[in-house]
Amino acid sequence: MNIAETIKETRRIVKEWKMQGLTVGLVPTMGFLHEGHESLIRRCAAENDKTVVSVFVNPMQFGKNEDLEGYPRDFRRDSRICQEAGAHLIFHPCPEEMYPPDFFTYMDMDTITEGLCGGNRPGHFRGVCTVVGKLFHIVSPDRAYFGQKDAQQLSVIKKMVRDLDFDLEIVGCPTVREADGLAKSSRNTYLSEAERQQATVIHRSLRYAEEAIAAGERDVKTIREEMIRMISQQPLADIDYVEFVDWGLLQPIEKLEKPALVAVAVRFGDTRLIDNYLWE
Ligand code: AMP
């Protein structure tokens, strides 16, 4: 497995592969890899001749008061996980490699980015679109793999690829969970023991929604109120949003119609966790 810290070196390696007619898959990550990332890398390795994993904590997608400085990092461990999961190249640039001081060009999106996490994290999706757009140009992958856990991000990237005619396929992958249902996240390491226990309410509230929908409930207000009640019972939980949107442009809905996304963001102390249920 190769490790490249520069755009030039990454391009050189990928170009060689392409000259041999090999297919290339990309898994963009911010590192501190867990089984969620690993499942993306394994799938990518199964579906492409060569797998590139990018490990880059993207400053542009963090707000002023967010956890950029404290975001967990362990590149040695990440390298081992990538190798074991079948990656061929890690692209591990420093911030200056991606954003030199004279960097002034951005990719951004309306509408889909205005609600959910975009509403609470201004500029977040501009940072995501810009870095992912750059990664697509640098790696030129045939396919790129994203987790359903970050459902709005997945939707935004799919739309960006359609709108700006990127020539690749976006593959959405299922959310990997802890045994008690909590979605795996690099940010779970921030949680205290009590927060960690109470955080399971996120998944329980989504299971409740899933069951209510399966039982025929179509009124968003009814399900949403019960989810908010469940989450609010946990003293350390501070709800950012519990939203029901269509699985297209992510606009709020009042009556459930397929496909719809039930999305939840909850803060435990300084840690903001997200999860969702896609009804499709
Ligand atoms: P991150 O490093 O948090 O930016 O995540 C990198 C990629 O891994 C994104 O496409 C995420 O959606 C995906 N991912 C993160 N957590 C999970 C999970 N628990 N299950 C599946 N994919 C995940």
Image: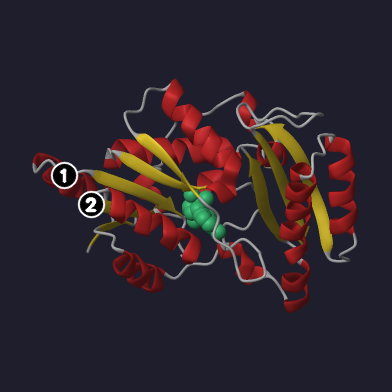
Calculate the distance from the C-alpha at mark 1 to the C-alpha at mark 2: 7 Å
How would you rate the neighbour count of disc 2 (Cα within 10 Å): few for under 14, some for 14-19, many for 20 or more? many
Question: In the shown orientation, is residue 277 left or right of residue 22?
Answer: right
- Callouts 1 and 2 close, C-beta under 8 Å: yes
Mark 1 / mark 2, whichever is N-terminal: 1
Q: Residue at x 48, y 35 (%)?
A: 157
- Amino acid type at circle 1 is Leu
Is residue 109 shown above or below 211?
above
Is residue 3 shown above or below 280?
below
The residue under label 2 is: 50
Answer with the quarter of the image where residue 193 lies: bottom right
Residue farthest left in this picture: 20
Residue farthest front in this picture: 215
Is residue 124 shown above or below 89?
above
Answer with the quarter of the image where residue 183 lies: bottom right
Q: Residue at x 58, y 62 (%)?
A: 185
Question: In the shown orientation, is residue 183 left or right of residue 200?
Answer: left
Give 79 or 196, whichever is nearer the viewer.
Answer: 196
- Amino acid type at circle 2 is Lys
x and y percentages locating residue 171 in the rendered image: 42, 42
Colour scheme shown: secondary structure
The residue under label 1 is: 22
> Can you see residue 65?
no
